[in-house]
Image: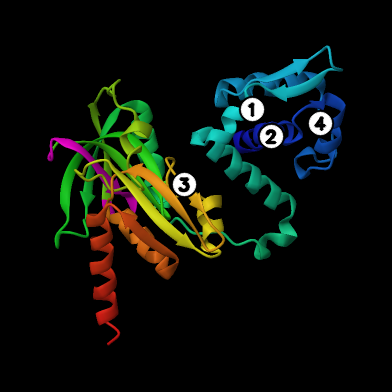
Amino acid sequence: MTKDLFDKYIWLVDTIYRAGKITFEEINERWLRSRLSEGEDIPLRTFHNWRIAIEQVFDININCNRKGGYYYYIENADDMQKGGIRNWLLNTFAVNNLINESHHLKRRILFEEIPSGRKYLTPVIEAMRDGLELELYYQSYWYEEPSTYTLQPYCIKVFKQRWYVIGFCKERNNIRTFSLDRIQQLTTLDTKFIYPKDFDPEAYFADYFGIMIENKKLETIRIKVYGMHVQYIRALPLHHSQCEIETTEDYSIFEYRMKPTLDFRQELLSRGADVEVLVPLFFREEIVQAVNKMSSLYK
């Protein structure tokens, strides 16, 4: 029952968001075309109850412009395009609802698997919500044997089809990142912790490409991108600091302000001969060494 109600909230937000502005009568028409309606109209009172619940659950306000003909719209809809958990949730559930309504197409819509989220994502989120420490029995790729860590979970992040939990690790006496797919056993402890007010997850990762946090200097990085690959980089920026500083018929040069970590180097190498690092020179040399090493494997 709760899931059905949740799906209805998502449907309503998605419908109004995509329409921009819409009357109650138009909402009801679209509702009747949805499998969720089961052929029944939305009572006006129910509609307003959903509006109130959506504000409480998602912090999304559905307002009404009475002067323009009683059109409903989402307040500060532009904020929903800036990413974050609300946008991710809405996209996920909206797509899920659409697929359920088009059940005969299910086998023709393929998704990427994120297996690490299935087992441990829920208890991690619950521990974050309740301010409880976690005990992880964790197998790092860097060590032969697993170890036990006590973690105060601050935030979670998905990157390259993997979920990660970031928090204060008592054994390391520092903030550390753990991949959920490398956790062999997880226990929620009774020990409470207080989430630090000065910790900002977005700011914590702002200078990095992905999930790796390395003690490196902030650098101005320039890459030269060739041919059609320019369109891919332009459409899906590698970092929020990306700027296209030179454009020609054959290539474009993109500039970033970030720390050149291992995962960013791996990302550039995965683009093959379509991407060339220009500066800084030490980072260019790291790429050259990696390319030479790869080349030697095929001799």
Mark 1, residue position: 77
Q: Quadrant of residue 94?
A: top right
Label 2: few (<14), some (14–19) or many (≥20) C-alpha neighbours in 10 Å: some
- Residues in magenta? 171-184
Residue at image mark 3: 245
Camera-nearest label, 4 or 2: 4
| Precedes in sequence: disc 2 or disc 1 | 2
The disc, 3 or 2, on the residue closer to the chain's N-terminal end is 2
> Where is residue 285 shown, x and y percent of the image?
24, 62
Check disc 2 and give the amino acid type: Lys
* Mark 4 or 3, nearer chain start: 4
Given this view, does label 1 or label 4 mark the residue nearer the observer? Answer: 1
Mark 3: amino acid:
Ile
Q: Residue furthest top?
A: 67
Dot 4: few (<14), some (14–19), or many (≥20) neighbours within 10 Å?
Answer: some
Indicate the secondary structure of the residue bearing disc 2. Answer: helix
Q: Residue 25, located in which quarter of the rendered image?
A: top right
Point out residue 183 in the picture as x, y percentages from the top left corner: 28, 52
Q: Is residue 11 above or below residue 200?
A: below
Q: Position of residue 52 (x, y in %)?
A: 65, 18
Residue bearing the label numbered 4: 27
Label 4 – label 3 distance at C-alpha: 45 Å
Mark 3 nearby-residue class (10 Å; few <14, some 14–19, many ≥20): few
The answer to whether residue 154 is left or right of residue 33 is: left
Disc number lying in front (2 or 1): 1
